């Protein structure tokens, strides 16, 4: 199934065709008007240079006017083998289609709402026949049945016509188009960007990135810019302020020589208040007794840190390098 972009927005078009596999671009006067275009011919020529195949409107009240407009655009600079002229279905439209296709000029007969209209376009040799699915559904019609009937007619009678699924509103329409066996689908950029999205895919991808990071990145790479250390001479109230300032639930306590004496945590504070009460206000960090802190070397893998978090049931690890504290690793940092 050929995939076209349906747009007149230059930014969308540039981004979409970076994908590298789109067949071409469909556009309409309505799109151009919506995007504030005033130089239609200038935009058409610009778009023709940007995309492999451009499908653009050739309007006229009579077949002769439609044919003349198509030739005018070709003389303006459009390439015959890279241009498709869109013609609204009508008696004059299918007459113009026959004239143009006899001249080996590609035509898309669009604004098709019935099988009869599609049949007339096929008989006239239309390169594409384009039912507007979204608009039909807006009016309460079974647009998908019409699309299927058009595909069946092409296959049964052997018409050299491609059925284009258009007026796409949401990703489900693309599944409908594939199931119906259409030859072409033209899709707005907003919908196209959603075609590869799925919550389960996102979860799986995130998990792959997370596990790869754990196995390849070291602890130092995940550290924040702050190293939450305090002197043991600091009072307990001041230590709490520093803890808040650093944004951690703990601080590394250093002695006068800058060596690690221990780690003071918010859990230690709660237990201290429970046992000492208001006396806490007059205490210093040097009054505390410290055990050996749970620590990890900066060069260790994040996977090792993850295992240590699980085995010790702590939320924060002291990170050291050459025996000196260089930061704290919070369990939440593993997911960043």
Image: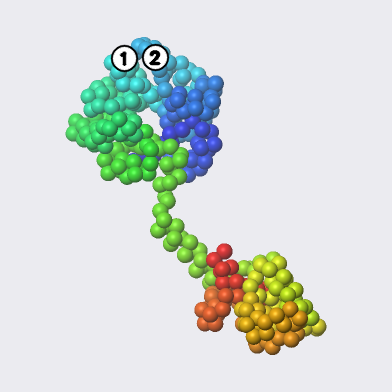
User: Position of 163 compared to 37: left or right?
Assistant: left
Q: Disc 1 marks which residue?
A: 92
Mark 2, residue position = 60
Q: Residue at x 38, y 38 (%)?
A: 169
Picture residue at 76% right of the left edge, 81% below the top:
282
Circle nearer the N terminus (1, 2) = 2
Residue 146 placement, left or right of 11: left
Q: CA distance from mark 1 to mark 2?
A: 9 Å
- Residue 68 spot, x, y in % from top left: 41, 13
| Residue at disc 1, secondary structure | helix
- Corner quadrant of residue 120: top left
Give the x, y percent position of residue 116.
22, 24
Contact (CB < 8 A) between labels 1 and 2?
Answer: yes
- In the rendered view of the protein, which quadrant contains the N terminus? top left
One can see residue 99 in this view? no
Q: Decide which of 99, 214 is in the foreground and name it.
A: 214
Seen from the viewer's position, the closer of residues 58 and 234 is 234
> Is 282 in front, or is 204?
282
Question: Whole-percent x and y of residue 279?
Answer: 72, 82
């Amino acid at each position: 199934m050929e995939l076209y972009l349906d747009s007149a927005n230059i930014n969308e078009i540039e981004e979409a065709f970076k994908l590298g596999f789109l067949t071409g671009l469909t556009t309409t006067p309505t799109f151009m008007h919506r995007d504030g275009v005033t130089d239609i011919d200038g935009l058409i020529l610009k778009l023709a240079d940007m995309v492999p195949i451009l499908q653009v409107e050739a309007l006229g009240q009579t077949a002769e006017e439609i044919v003349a407009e198509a030739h005018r655009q070709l003389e303006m600079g459009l390439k015959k083998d890279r241009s498709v002229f869109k013609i609204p279905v009508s008696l004059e439209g299918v007459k113009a289609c026959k004239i143009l296709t006899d001249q080996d000029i590609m035509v898309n007969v669009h604004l098709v709402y019935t099988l009869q209209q599609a049949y007339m376009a096929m008989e006239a040799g239309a390169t594409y026949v384009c039912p507007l699915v979204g608009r039909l559904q807006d009016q309460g019609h079974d647009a998908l049945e019409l699309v299927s009937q058009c595909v069946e007619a092409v296959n049964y009678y052997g018409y050299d016509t491609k059925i284009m699924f258009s007026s796409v509103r949401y990703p489900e329409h693309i599944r409908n188009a594939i199931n119906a066996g259409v030859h072409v689908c033209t899709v707005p950029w907003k919908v196209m960007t959603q075609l590869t999205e799925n919550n389960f895919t996102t979860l799986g991808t995130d998990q792959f990135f997370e596990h790869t990071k754990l196995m390849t990145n070291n602890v130092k790479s995940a550290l924040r810019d702050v190293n939450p250390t305090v002197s043991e001479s600091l009072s307990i109230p001041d230590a709490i302020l520093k803890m808040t300032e650093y944004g951690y639930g703990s601080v590394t306590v250093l002695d006068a020589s800058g060596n690690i004496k221990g780690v003071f945590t918010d859990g230690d504070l709660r237990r201290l208040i429970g046992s000492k009460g208001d006396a806490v206000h007059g205490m210093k960090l040097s009054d505390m007794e410290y055990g050996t802190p749970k620590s990890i070397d900066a060069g260790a893998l994040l996977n090792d840190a993850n295992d240590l978090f699980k085995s010790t049931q702590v939320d924060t690890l002291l990170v050291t390098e050459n025996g000196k504290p260089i930061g704290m690793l919070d369990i939440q940092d593993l997911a960043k």
